[in-house]
Image: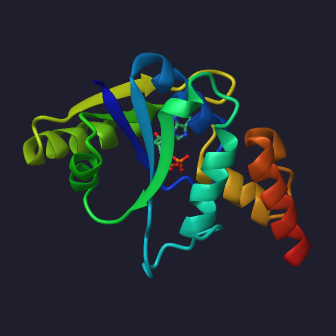
């Protein structure tokens, strides 16, 4: 069984994440989207962990093979969570050389920590290749319309957030 963990902050889950999930489902038997729980850390998040998990779950319901996908939150080392969840593959998306440099070092570190887990990187596809959660957050918090960058459940959550501000 090829069980892939797709880890990230997913704050929020956007169309680039959806594309990597869709392509992972075509490649692997099971896909676990691992939403990193920052706990009380300093990072300023748009959505709390439970909502990020919920939005990712709602966003993937129409993907082919979605019954083979699940969304879970985790803390600590990604390789430890991968082992606990029974994943033997970690999937990451590559948008540019900045992602590449980061993933190279992280992938080598993870291999050193857990050499039974293989890293698979998928290149970002147009038209979502330049999207990032940071970009979505910036557009949304500065009053712009980020809804074209995210799946409908996330667009709805961004609209709700806007009403509260
Ligand atoms: P982001 O990088 O969007 O701020 P994450 O840190 O949660 O958010 O990203 C999780 C994973 O998704 C990373 O491997 C990242 O490279 C990948 N990813 C992010 N945006 C895209 C995109 N537009 N296309 C493909 N993969 C992406």
Residue 21 in percent (x, y) is at: 53, 32
Q: Residue at x 62, y 22 (%)?
A: 64
Residue 17 in percent (x, y) is at: 57, 38
Who is closer to the viewer here, 53 or 13?
53
Relative to 98, does residue 38 appear above or below in the rendering? below
Residue 156 in percent (x, y) is at: 84, 54
Residue 58 visible in the picture: yes
Who is closer to the viewer here, 140 or 59?
59
Q: Quadrant of the N terminus?
A: top left
The image shows a total of numbered marks equal to 0
Q: Residue furthest bottom?
A: 40
Q: Residue at x 41, y 47 (%)?
A: 7
Q: Residue furthest front?
A: 67
User: Quarter of the image holding residue 30?
Assistant: top left
Q: Quadrant of the C terminus?
A: bottom right
Relative to 65, does residue 150 appear above or below in the rendering? below
Residue 13 visible in the picture: no
Q: Residue at x 81, y 69 (%)?
A: 161
Q: Residue furthest right?
A: 163
């Amino acid at each position: 069984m090829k069980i892939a963990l797709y880890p990230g902050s997913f704050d929020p889950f956007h169309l680039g994440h959806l594309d990597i999930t869709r392509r992972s489902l075509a490649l692997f038997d099971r896909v676990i989207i691992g939403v990193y729980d920052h706990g009380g850390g300093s990072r300023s998040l748009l959505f709390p962990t439970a909502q990020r998990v919920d939005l990712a779950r709602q966003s993937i319901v129409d993907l082919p093979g979605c019954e083979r996908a699940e969304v879970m939150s985790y803390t600590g080392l990604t390789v430890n969570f991968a082992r606990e969840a029974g994943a033997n593959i970690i999937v990451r998306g590559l948008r540019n050389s900045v992602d590449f440099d980061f993933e190279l070092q992280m992938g080598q570190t993870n291999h050193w920590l857990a050499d039974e887990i293989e890293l698979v990187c998928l290149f970002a596809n147009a038209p979502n290749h330049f999207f990032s959660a940071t970009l979505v957050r910036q557009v949304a918090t500065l009053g712009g319309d980020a809804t074209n960058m995210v799946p409908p459940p996330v667009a709805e959550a961004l609209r709700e957030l806007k009403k509260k501000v």
